[in-house]
Image: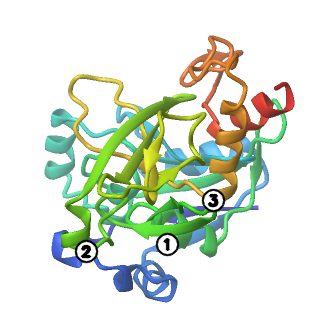
Amino acid sequence: MNICVIDTNDVRYNETDMMHRNFASDTINDVLEDCISFVKINSKDDLLENIVKEIVNYDNEIPIHTATIKNKNNDLFLMCHIAPSKEVYEEMKSKKVKYNGIASHMTDLKLRVYGKAVLYKLDASSEEPNLANITSDDIVELFVSNFIHKGVIVNVNGTFDECKYIFNPIDWISPNEVSTYKYHEVEFLGKILMLFFDSSSKTKNDVLTDLFDPLFGRIVIGMRSQYHDINDVDIIYEDLDVETLKNIIKLCENSGQSRALSEEEDINGKVVNGRRNYNNFHKILNSRLVHN
């Protein structure tokens, strides 16, 4: 199976670059192809060997951070890179270690990354995740998902459509129209559902009655991560598709179901038998539905 090594690079995006056409798959593939390479490994020992070799050149004094890039269904993507701090930045500067723009955009720390990074995939279908093969298509999709997010439109006739956005779930609606939209948040299984609805409409939208008080007009829904710290300022959007929203609605039809994570479900960051665990929203939702 393959892991991916992300070499240092100067890939950067500012606000003026935030246009859908800049994140087409072919365009991003061209951006990434000169910066990534694949290494064939056979075991987790090989993985650790490559992480230590590629990232810190066997220097055990340099800390390594493991970022959760995506955790959906049975696919868990993780990325290792030098753990950024003021002291580490100074040391990287003295050693003339170069910036890694791709890893900086992908890491869960929202900080600048220096030096190489190693991106790999785990099959989390069993209790003990196993290494899985990562492909260039995986990496393109992961990178694009940092900028282009998916939401769901709930129409008043009960139908659903999917939408894509960059800045917020209703950034594609015209300024004149968006001025009539109002916003509510709903906490659900460790995530925040972002509900935007047209307050000027007199047509009741009954689709989400079990999820929230009666709303009117077309409803646009996005999803984001919860804030866990008072210093959190960045909104981390997560993709929401029609099937997932329908499952959320179905679960909410049972008024006896708690919308909060149980202690057994909330395993994020907990280390058991030497292995760090990660919350998987989709697995938790599916498990709730099975036992509903």
Which callout, 1 or 3, points at the residue further toward the start of the chain?
Answer: 1
Residue at horizontal 34%, vertical 30%?
227
In the rendered image, the residue lying farthest to the top is 263
Q: Measured from the top left, where is residue 285 in percent x and y? A: 70, 35
Q: Nearer the viewer, residue 15 or 95?
A: 15
From the viewer's side, name the closer residue of 81 and 77. Answer: 77
- Tell me the quadrant of the picture where the N terminus can be found: bottom right
Are the two marked residues, 2 and 3, in contact with CB atoms closer than 8 angstroms? no
Q: Earlier in the sequence, mark 2 or mark 3?
A: 3
Q: Is mark 1 on a helix, strand or loop?
A: strand
Q: Earlier in the sequence, mark 1 or mark 2?
A: 1
Name which residue type carries label 2: Ser
What is the x, y in percent for residue 116?
A: 40, 58
Residue 174, labelled with which disc?
A: 2
- Pick the residue in front: 146 or 76: 146
Picture quadrant of residue 258: top right
Q: In which quarter of the image is the C terminus?
A: top right
Numbered label attached to residue 36: 1
Residue 18 location in percent, x, y? 26, 74
Circle 3 residue: 158
Query: Is residue 226 in sight in this rendering?
Result: yes
Q: In the displayed structure, does residue 18 sit left or right of residue 119?
A: left
- What's the CA distance linking mark 2 and mark 3? 23 Å
Q: Which residue is drawn at 41% across and 46% down?
A: 195
Residue at figure coordinates x 35%, y 36% from the top left = 62
